[in-house]
Amino acid sequence: MDDISGILFDLDGVLFVGDRMIAGADTVVALVKQKQIPCRFITNTTTQSRDAIAQKLQGMGLSIQSREIISTPSAALLYLRQQGYRSCHLLVADEVKPEFEGIHESDLNPGAVVIGDIGSAWNYELLNKVFGMLMNGADLIALHKNKFWQTDEGLRMDIGAFVAGLEYVTGKQAAVIGKPSPAFFELAIRQLELPAARVVMIGDDIDSDVGGAQRAGLKGALVRTGKYRPEYAAASPIRPDYIFDSVADMLGIF
């Protein structure tokens, strides 16, 4: 990895799973900072604010500050402002609504519906309500479109299925903010002030992390932790630039 000058770390599945830090992750983060390697921590998580994520990471022993985290809600706020939306229906967790400061919320003919993780709140009535908004002209914006994620209890379906279903019934294409959107990776590398080719993305998702990074011109490294499944990775057309058993294996590189 001699041609790599900066690192983007995924969080869930790479540095921790559930409430458990992956062994060696704290040492890797500390070493990267000690060597002053430009880095950012990027996540599709939409259930917590950056401050809450940072507090969780620090509680595990990971020295990561909220300003070093790039989340999809924060990127979505920039997108909504750039596009000039006057009102939006925010279908996101209450904990992350403060990240959308200045955005007017409305259930009455909103300009866009913003979809994030809302857990067990999904039901037919809610989907039909969103369907009506979209058919009345609202744009569909997804904070991400992940298929599944890893929990302490195993794999769980993610919001990608709901986003895909709404696309199917409305004929609209969602604007996807988080990984694997090229714009999300471009936002991250602008903060690193490095060319894309000199940045590596470390992730457990071969589609969003590795494939998304490669399409944006970055290198992609896959770790065999978190949501990684050998059969799924083997069947994918995506070929990682690097593969590690876990993020701790990076200790032998620096």
Image (cartoon, helix red, strand yellow):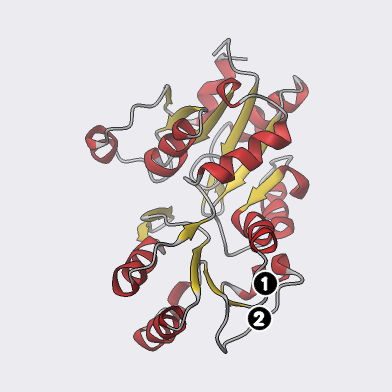
User: Mark 1 Cα within 10 Å, few/some/many (few <14, many 20+)?
Assistant: some
Q: Residue furthest top?
A: 2
User: Mark 2 Cα within 10 Å, few/some/many (few <14, many 20+)?
Assistant: some
Query: Which residue carries the number 1 mark?
Result: 97
Q: Is residue 244 above or below residue 254?
A: below
Q: Quadrant of residue 167?
A: bottom left
Q: State left or right for residue 174 relative to residue 154.
A: right
Q: Is residue 108 above or below residue 79?
A: below
> Could you say where residue 42 lies in the image, as x and y percent from the top left?
60, 44
In percent of the image, x 58 and y 72: which residue is there? Answer: 93
Q: Quadrant of residue 104?
A: bottom right
- Give the quadrant of the N terminus: top right
> Could you say where residue 127 lies in the image, as x and y percent from the top left?
39, 81
Give whichever of 135, 243 is nearer the camera: 135
In percent of the image, x 67 and y 72: which residue is there? Answer: 97
1 or 2: tag closer to the N-terminus = 1
- Give the quadrant of the C terminus: top right
Query: Which residue carries the number 2 mark?
Result: 105
The amino acid at mark 2 is: Glu
The amino acid at mark 1 is: Lys
| Mark identifier at residue 85 | none
Kind of element beneath mark 1 = helix
In percent of the image, x 70 and y 24: which residue is there? Answer: 31
Q: State left or right for residue 27 relative to residue 125.
A: right
Q: Are marks 1 and 2 in contact (CB under 8 Å)?
A: no
In percent of the image, x 77 and y 47: which residue is there? Answer: 67
> Could you say where residue 10 lies in the image, as x and y percent from the top left?
55, 41
